[in-house]
RNA sequence: UCCCCGAUAGCUCAACGGUAGAGCAGCCGGCUGUUAACCGGCUUGUUGUAGGUUCGAAUCCUACUCGGGGAGCCA
C-alpha cells in the first residue's frame, strides 16, 4: 500500500488505488447514516482529501469520534470517485490510526477564520492554515523559478559571506557580530574598544548585500547570482521591510544598464508565469480571499512589457500630472512612495523601470554617465509593493570610482580589494538585487511582508 | 523614529456613562452523502495594565504595554 500525498490522491486518475494518507484533520462531519466525513490536509496542496470513515471500524467510537481540527492521522483505504460536489475523489477508510489528538480547548486554530494579526502570534501553527500553506507553496515556486531562470541562462550560483568586514557599504544599519563581552569589552589605552581582541580581529557585521563579493566573482566567472539571507538593522516598521530577508543578486560581466533591465524584466516575467502555471490552485485562493485582481496582475506581469522611463522623464510626468503630492516634485530629489505609487498604480497600472538617477541620491559604485549628473541606476517599481528590484551598471573606471567614494565620504583604502577589480582587467558589468519576500508579496497579493516569511524578524520581533 | 487608529469569551466581533452580548469553537441532544453541514439546548469574561473623573466606567481622561495602518530608510 503506497503512501500518497493528498495532491495526488485528489486527482481522478487515482481512483481505484489502495493508498495510505498521512496528514492533519481539518474538519469532521458525522453522519448518522453510519459513517463520518473527515477532511485531511498534508500540505501538498490547498485542497483537502475527503475521507469516508465507516462506523464499522473497530476504533470508530474510541478514536474517530474524538478527532478534532488539528489531529494527526494515517488512513488506509481505497480511493473512489466521489458522488458529492467539490472533489473528484474520496478515500474509503479501511483503517485509521490516530497519531496525535489536538485538544480543541487549547488548540488555537479552529474552523472559523482567524485574522492575519492573530496568526502572526502563533507563527509555529499558522503553516497549517490555508493562507499560509498557499503562501509557502508559492514562495517555494518562486525560489525554484529563480534557480531555473538563472541556471538555464548559464549563471553560476555562488555563495557570498554572511559575516562581512566591509562595514560601510552604505546600504543601511548593520548588525554587529562579535564574541566580545558586551558588559566588559577589552579596551585600548585610550578607552576605545579593542577590536583586535575580537574573534576576527576587527569589527564584523551581518551582510547587507553580497554585491561587492558578487562583483569579484562575476569579474572572473562571467555571470553569477547569489541567493541568501540579508540583514538590515534599520528601525523600520512597515508592511514591506524585514530585518532578515532573502535576496537574489545576479551580477554579469560585460553587461550594460540596458542588458540589466532586460534581464530584470525577463526574470520577473518568468516568476509570474511560473506561479500562474504551477500554482494555479493557490493563485485562485489568493484571488478569492486576498486580492481579487491578482490573476490579471500576474497575467499582465507575465505578458506585457514593463514601462521604462528615465528619472528625468519621471519627474516631468509627475510635475505635469496635475496631482497634488505631499512632497513637491523637483529634479534631484529622491522619488517618494507617493510618486512611485502614482507611476505604477495610476500612470501605467503595471511595473515600471525608472533609470538614470541623479548621482547625489545613489550609491558610490553606480556608473557615472557622460552628462556628469546621473548614474546608471535602475529601480523596478511594482504596484502596491513599491521598489522590488534595485540595480545598476557598476563604475568600472578606477579614478572615477575613487573620486565617487570620496564624494560619498568613504575611504578608498578601505576598499582596496574592491578597487583591485578595476586595477586589473576591469570590465563593464552590471547587476541588481531582488527582495524575495517582496516578490512573493507581488505574486500572492499579501499586503504585509511578515505574512510571506515563516518566522519574520523585525524590530522587537524575534519570537519562535 | 514620527503620525493616526485599535485592544471586550479560545477565535471573529457587538454593546448611548446605567445588570457584558452574538456567531463560530466546545459539551449534550436531533437530523443528514455531508462540503466553514444544518436544527435545538448548555457553558464560556479580572473588558490589555496602572491610575484618575463619576452615585455609577468596556464606554470619559492620563500614562504604559502590545498590535495595526501610514511616513522615512530600502529589497
Image (cartoon, coloured by chain):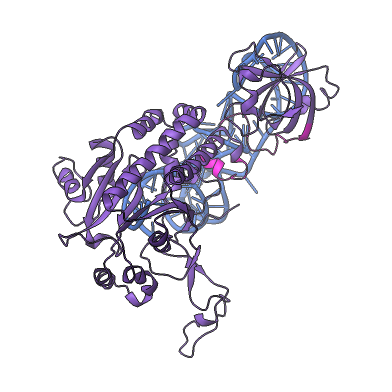
Chain colours: A purple, B blue
Residue A453 horizontal/vertical position (percent): 52, 46
Q: Nearer the viewer, residue A153 or A408?
A: A153
A227 left or right, relative to A389? right
Depicted A308 relative to depicted A213: above or below: above
Residue A283 appears in view? yes
Depicted A140 relative to depicted A27: above or below: below
Depicted A109 relative to depicted A183: above or below: above
Residue A391 horizontal/vertical position (percent): 33, 53
Q: Residue at x 55, y 41 (%)?
A: A118
Q: Which residues are magenta?
A: A98-126
Residue A103 counted in the magenta span: yes
Figure quadrant of the N terminus of chain A: top right
Residue A33 counted in the magenta span: no
Residue A328 appears in view? no
Q: Residue at x 52, y 79 (%)?
A: A201
Residue A120 horizontal/vertical position (percent): 54, 44
Q: Quadrant of residue B8?
A: top right
Q: Residue at x 37, y 69 (%)?
A: A418
A124 left or right, relative to A73? left
Q: What secondary structure do most residues of the magenta stretch adopt?
A: loop
Residue A117 horizontal/vertical position (percent): 51, 42
Amino acid at each position: 500500500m503506497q503512501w500518497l500525498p493528498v495532491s495526488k490522491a485528489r486527482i481522478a486518475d487515482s481512483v481505484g488505488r489502495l493508498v495510505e494518507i498521512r496528514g492533519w484533520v481539518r474538519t469532521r462531519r458525522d453522519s448518522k447514516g453510519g459513517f463520518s466525513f473527515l477532511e485531511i490536509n498534508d500540505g501538498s496542496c490547498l485542497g483537502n482529501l475527503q475521507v469516508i470513515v465507516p462506523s464499522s471500524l473497530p476504533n470508530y467510537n474510541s478514536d474517530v469520534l474524538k478527532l478534532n481540527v488539528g489531529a494527526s492521522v494515517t488512513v488506509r483505504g481505497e480511493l473512489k470517485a466521489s458522488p458529492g460536489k467539490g472533489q473528484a475523489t474520496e478515500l474509503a477508510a479501511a483503517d485509521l490510526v490516530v497519531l496525535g489528538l489536538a485538544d480543541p480547548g487549547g488548540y488555537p486554530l479552529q474552523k472559523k477564520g482567524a485574522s492575519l494579526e492573530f496568526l502572526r502570534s502563533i507563527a509555529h501553527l499558522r503553516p497549517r492554515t490555508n493562507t499560509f500553506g498557499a503562501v509557502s507553496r508559492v514562495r517555494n515556486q518562486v525560489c525554484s523559478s529563480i534557480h531555473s531562470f538563472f541556471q538555464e541562462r548559464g549563471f553560476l550560483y555562488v555563495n557570498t559571506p554572511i559575516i562581512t568586514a566591509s562595514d560601510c557599504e552604505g546600504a543601511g544599519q548593520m548588525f554587529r557580530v562579535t564574541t566580545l563581552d558586551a558588559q566588559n569589552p577589552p579596551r585600548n589605552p585610550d578607552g576605545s574598544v579593542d577590536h583586535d581582541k575580537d574573534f576576527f580581529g576587527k569589527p564584523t557585521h551581518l551582510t547587507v548585500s553580497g554585491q561587492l563579493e558578487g562583483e569579484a566573482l562575476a569579474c572572473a566567472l562571467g555571470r553569477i547570482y547569489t541567493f541568501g539571507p540579508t540583514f538590515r538593522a534599520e528601525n523600520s516598521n512597515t508592511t514591506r521591510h524585514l530585518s532578515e530577508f532573502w535576496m537574489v543578486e545576479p551580477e554579469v560581466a560585460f553587461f550594460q544598464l540596458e542588458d540589466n533591465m532586460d534581464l530584470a524584466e525577463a526574470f520577473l516575467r518568468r516568476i509570474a508565469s511560473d506561479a500562474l502555471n504551477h500554482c494555479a490552485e493557490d493563485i485562485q485562493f489568493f484571488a478569492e480571499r486576498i486580492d481579487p485582481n491578482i490573476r490579471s496582475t500576474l497575467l499582465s506581469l507575465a505578458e506585457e512589457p514593463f514601462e521604462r522611463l528615465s528619472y528625468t522623464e519621471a519627474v516631468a510626468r509627475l510635475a505635469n500630472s496635475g496631482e497634488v503630492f505631499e512632497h513637491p516634485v523637483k529634479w534631484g530629489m529622491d522619488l517618494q512612495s507617493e510618486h512611485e505609487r502614482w507611476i505604477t498604480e495610476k500612470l501605467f497600472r503595471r511595473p515600471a523601470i525608472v533609470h538614470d538617477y541623479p548621482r547625489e541620491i545613489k550609491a558610490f559604485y553606480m556608473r557615472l554617465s557622460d552628462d556628469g549628473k546621473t548614474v546608471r541606476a535602475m529601480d523596478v517599481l511594482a504596484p502596491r509593493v513599491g521598489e522590488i528590484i534595485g540595480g545598476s551598471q557598476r563604475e568600472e573606471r578606477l579614478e572615477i570610482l575613487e573620486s565617487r567614494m570620496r564624494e560619498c565620504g568613504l575611504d578608498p583604502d578601505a576598499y582596496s580589494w574592491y578597487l583591485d577589480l578595476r586595477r586589473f582587467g576591469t570590465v563593464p558589468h552590471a547587476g541588481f538585487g531582488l527582495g524575495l519576500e517582496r516578490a512573493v508579496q507581488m505574486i500572492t497579493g499579501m499586503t504585509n511582508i511578515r505574512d510571506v516569511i515563516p518566522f519574520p524578524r523585525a524590530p522587537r520581533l524575534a519570537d519562535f
